[in-house]
Image (spheres, coloured by chain):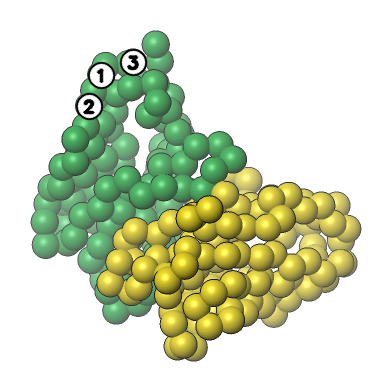
């Protein structure tokens, strides 16, 4: 039973345009959401997070939007840069349970 | 180094053998996680250690898998009688404490190949 779903295995975006990565979750107890970025042969690195009390969090070129009623979140990257090419993992946690549940990831390709 | 260190980086073993994977978390980090990533799959939670509390073993896939942690330092993940489906990248991560769960620092992983 996948609690965190990233339905797009890959996404290609032109350099300079906006990249939008989507994530859906099923567990209504999740109250903290995170995005991690992973390059080949490296461990994932934390990118940005959002608490369930907010619907938007922005950090430079990265913005995460949370729609609790739809159990959906998205990561926007604008403008997209070549170094953004990586696998992006959506993750969620429940403050009453210390596990962090990850999705399968979306591979983002930034095209020149 | 200051990051999470995992060893070995690569391990090739024969089916039926036991393997031991090691994780050195960042000094002072009380929370430690093990995850597994099989080919084409996401990060699968295995086990979580927090300080001196009993570990959360709910993600371990079978009784062939076990993990230990000495205090707030090194952790070892042991897989007994390895099977081909155990082939995966095993990732370790640590965080400062429960309040900063969101900022996990991952190691580069151990690529396990079971022949």
Mark 3–mark 1 Cα distance, whole angstroms, equals: 6 Å
Whether residue A98 is visible to the viewer of this picture, yes or no, is yes
Q: Is residue A13 above or below residue B42?
A: above
As helix, strand or loop, the secondary structure at mark 2 comes to loop
Q: In the rendered structure, are the residues bearing label 3 and label 1 in contact, judged by CB atoms less than 8 Å apart?
A: yes
As helix, strand or loop, the secondary structure at mark 3 comes to strand
On the picture, is A56 further left or further right than A1? Answer: left
Q: In the rendered structure, are the residues bearing label 1 and label 2 in contact, judged by CB atoms less than 8 Å apart?
A: yes
What residue does disc 3 label?
Answer: A14
Residue A96 position, x and y percent, is 29, 79
Circle 2 residues within 10 Å: few <14, some 14–19, many ≥20: some
Mark 1–mark 2 Cα distance, whole angstroms, equals: 6 Å
Residue B42 position, x and y percent, is 51, 51
Q: Point out the residue furthest to the front here.
A: B1
Q: Which mark is residue A17?
A: 1
Q: Which chain is green?
A: A
Q: Which mark is residue A66?
A: none
On the picture, is A16 further left or further right than B2? Answer: left
Whether residue A1 is visible to the viewer of this picture, yes or no, is no
């Amino acid at each position: 039973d996948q609690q965190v779903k990233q339905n797009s295995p890959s996404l290609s975006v032109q350099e300079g345009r906006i990249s939008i990565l989507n994530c859906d979750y099923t567990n209504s107890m999740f109250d903290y959401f995170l995005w991690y970025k992973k390059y080949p042969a490296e461990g994932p690195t934390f990118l940005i997070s959002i608490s369930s009390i907010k619907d938007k969090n922005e950090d430079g070129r990265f913005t995460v939007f949370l729609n609790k009623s739809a159990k959906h979140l998205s990561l926007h990257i604008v403008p997209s840069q070549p170094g953004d090419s990586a696998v992006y993992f959506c993750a969620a946690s429940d403050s009453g349970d210390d596990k962090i549940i990850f999705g399968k990831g979306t591979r983002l390709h930034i095209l020149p | 180094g200051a990051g999470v260190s995992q060893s070995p980086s690569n391990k090739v073993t024969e089916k039926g053998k036991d393997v031991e994977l090691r994780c050195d978390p960042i000094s002072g980090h009380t929370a430690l996680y093990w995850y597994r990533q099989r080919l084409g799959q996401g990060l699968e939670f295995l086990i979580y250690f927090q300080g001196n509390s009993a570990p959360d073993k709910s993600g371990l896939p079978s009784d062939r898998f076990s993990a230990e942690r000495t205090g707030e330092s090194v952790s070892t993940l042991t897989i007994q009688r390895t099977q081909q489906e155990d082939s995966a990248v095993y990732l370790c991560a640590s965080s400062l404490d429960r309040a900063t769960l969101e900022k996990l620092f991952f190691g580069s992983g151990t690529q396990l190949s079971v022949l």
